[in-house]
């Protein structure tokens, strides 16, 4: 494995952007409908869920386009995380701290994704809930202070891992090669981290609205 580590790392880096990054952004935009829809947030969210699940070959897309890449990125990421030597105590400069946090948030993000997929998508697949009841499920999650806090940690970790990972991706693929370009990239991805985090938190609080507590308010014929 050592001789091919360069290619494994390149693939790991690429899959962190496409499609793992897409998975995060898609989740943000879908769930943000709960907030953006206002008084009709429940309906807007469910409409978006149905639109996604009516895409052609959606199961193949989920397995081949999302599931397997996330599995590789997560498993190989764990290998990298536990092999890495973090020297933050000796070299506490900004990028070394970011290096350490990238590894920590990677582990948290993997655990969070497994938990989230199990409690939502897998439950639908097993027939324990339906797509129309996902709003109720999210309402139950976010009105519980414990699960709200765990989700908050998971979401912030995921957004940080993606944003900081994008900075690293641009460097490792030779897109931002000079100090000035890397500094500008740092500011851009800090901005992305803040914007996405705010959107996710607004979404989480939106799900606590009583309109998400039942499905009787939905127009399922839309």
Image: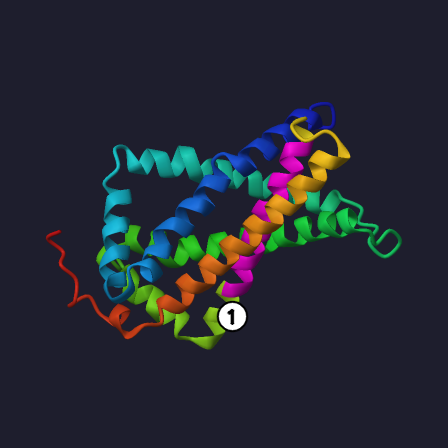
**Which residue is depicted at the point 49% across and 74% down?**
146
Residue, disc 1: 149
Asked if residue 83 lies left or right of residue 113, the reply is right
Q: Residue furthest right?
A: 90
| 102 is within the stretch colored magenta | no
Pick the residue in front: 35 or 63.
Answer: 35
Q: Is residue 217 above or below residue 52?
A: below
Q: Where in the figure is residue 101, as x and y percent of width and height?
A: 69, 53
What is the count of numbered marks? 1
When asked about the image quadrant of residue 42, the answer is bottom left
Q: Is residue 115 above or below residue 62?
A: below
Q: Residues within 10 Å of mark 1 (few under 14, many from 20)?
A: few
* Disc 1 element: helix
Asked if residue 60 lies left or right of residue 167, the reply is left
| 164 is within the stretch colored magenta | yes
Q: Where in the figure is residue 148, as x and y percent of width and height?
A: 46, 70
Q: Where in the figure is residue 70, as x and y percent of width and height?
A: 50, 41
When asked about the image quadrant of residue 207, the answer is bottom left
Asked if residue 124 lies left or right of residue 87, the reply is left
Magenta stretch, residue numbers: 152-171
When asked about the image quadrant of residue 64, the answer is top left
Question: How is the model colour-coded?
Answer: rainbow
Q: Where in the figure is residue 189, as x and y percent of width and height?
A: 60, 46
């Amino acid at each position: 494995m050592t001789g091919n580590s360069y290619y494994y790392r390149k693939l790991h880096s690429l899959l962190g952007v496409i499609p793992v990054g897409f998975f995060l952004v898609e989740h943000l935009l879908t769930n943000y409908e709960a907030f953006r829809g206002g008084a009709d947030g429940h309906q807007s969210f469910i409409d978006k869920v149905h639109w996604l699940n009516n895409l052609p070959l959606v199961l193949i897309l989920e397995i081949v386009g999302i599931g397997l890449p996330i599995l590789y990125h997560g498993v190989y990421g764990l290998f990298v995380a536990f092999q890495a030597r973090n020297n933050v105590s000796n070299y506490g400069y900004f990028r070394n701290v970011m290096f350490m946090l990238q590894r920590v948030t990677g582990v948290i993000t993997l655990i969070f994704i497994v938990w989230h997929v199990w409690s939502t998508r897998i439950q639908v697949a097993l027939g324990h809930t339906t797509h129309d009841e996902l709003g109720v499920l999210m309402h139950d999650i976010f009105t519980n202070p414990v699960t709200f806090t765990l989700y908050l940690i998971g979401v912030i970790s995921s957004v940080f891992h993606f944003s900081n990972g994008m900075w690293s991706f641009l460097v490792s693929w030779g897109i931002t090669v000079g100090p000035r370009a890397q500094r500008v990239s740092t500011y851009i991805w800090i901005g992305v981290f803040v914007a996405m985090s705010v959107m996710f938190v607004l979404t989480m609080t939106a799900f606590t609205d009583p309109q998400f507590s039942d499905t009787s308010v939905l127009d399922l014929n839309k």
